[in-house]
Every structure is written in C-alpha cells, then in structure tokens.
Image (tube, grey):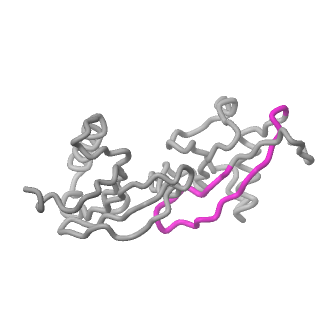
Amino acid sequence: MVDIFDDSSRTITIRLNGGMEKLKDEHVMEFSEQEKPSLRNIIKFTCKRFGCKDKAACAVIYSKGGIKLFDEDESFIKADDVLYLAINGEPFNYCAILDDYKMGALLGKGGFGEVYLATNKRNQKEFAVKFMDMTQALTSADEINNIYKEANSIKKLHHRNIVELYHAFVEGKKLIMIMEVAYGGELTEFV
C-alpha cells in the first residue's frame, strides 16, 4: 500500500457488521488504483483502527450486499465501495443496510409495528421503513423461512398500484422492510 496519494487515489469505507445497536463508526481507507491493498491488509488495517487488531486472524469482510469476500475476490473491490467487517467471523447482519438511511419522522403506528420515513443518504430519495414485531410468528425455522419466501415474492411485484418492497430482513424479533413511500393517507379512508 502506498503512503502518499495523488489525484487518482481512491477510498473504501469499512463499517462494522452488526445489528441496530452496533457501533456506527466507520473508517475510510485510501489507495491508488495501481496499488490496491489486499483483502488481508484491509482486514488488518480495519481491525487495528477499530481497536481489535488481535481479531484480524478470524475477521472476515462482507460486501454491502452481504456477500462474504475471499482473497480471490479483491479484484472486485472498487473505489467508493462500502465493506463490512465481521470481527469474530460472524454471518452478515442485514441491519447494515439501514446504515444507508437517515431515519426520520414516524409515519404511522399500528398493531403490528411502526413505519418511519427514511432518506437514502446518497441520493436523498425517501423510503418507508417498517418495523414489525414478529414475536408470535418467529417460533420455528419454517415460519422464518416462510416470511423470507413471501418477502422475496413481494419484491418481484412491480406495478404502479402496489407499494414496492426493496429489502426485508429479520433482526432479533423484528421484521424490517424498506419500501416505497405511499403518500396520501390511510387506505381505510378510501375504502
């Protein structure tokens, strides 16, 4: 890795893998296109920066989409990528997706949960983020699998009269859905 960067230098942002209560700190690593750091060096650098250099041997890196990266994948790392460090080698936590959003006002509250307005930090587009209490539904692996199947089916639906679902994942006992904002009030007002 080079010490001095010219105008063609690039950066990678590394965040900690984890749930909603994780440390929100991140580190930016600079590199030149000619001398990109290896995946192992990214892990060592980041573990040191997060104060856990003794964990570098077991730590792993995930892409923003939750794909575990291996040494042979380092050529796929591009400038301005966001990577997630799993200090103890734990599986990717999809709550990391929420790092891209600034949570805003409460849009609504009901029997199943709450919906908040959220703004994507990169493009300033607004989304609805729904947090649903799944305590009763999450009693078996089959029920959890059914929730994911249904969410994946809904994500495939694209119609102007259907609210689009972009992401759905479970964190603890909550189902979190990131979806299109539907302005205009409650559906019950029109039925």
Q: Residue furthest right?
A: 4
Q: Against 36, is 110 above or below?
A: below
Q: Is 129 placed left or right of 40 in the picture?
A: left
Residue drawn at x 58%, y 67% as measured from the top left: 23
Does residue 116 belong to the magenta stretch? no
- In the rendering, at what x and y percent does residue 30 appear? 79, 47
| Residue 190 x %, y % | 11, 57
Residue 87 point in image, percent of width and height: 61, 56
Q: Nearer the viewer, residue 180 or 13?
A: 180
Image coords of residue 181 (percent x, y): 33, 54
Q: Nearer the viewer, residue 148 or 185?
A: 185
Nearest the eye: 24 or 173: 24
Quadrant (top left, top right, bottom left, bottom right) of the N terminus: top right
Asked if the magenta segment contains residue 27, the reply would be: yes
Q: Residue furthest left?
A: 191
At horizontal 69% and vertical 29% (from top left) the residue drawn is 75
Does residue 152 appear to the left or right of 139 in the view shown?
A: right
Tally of numbered tags: 0
What's drawn in magenta, residue-wise?
13-34
Query: Does 32 sit left or right of 22 as displayed?
Result: right
Name the residue: 54% across, 49% down. Answer: 123
Q: Quadrant of the C terminus?
A: bottom left
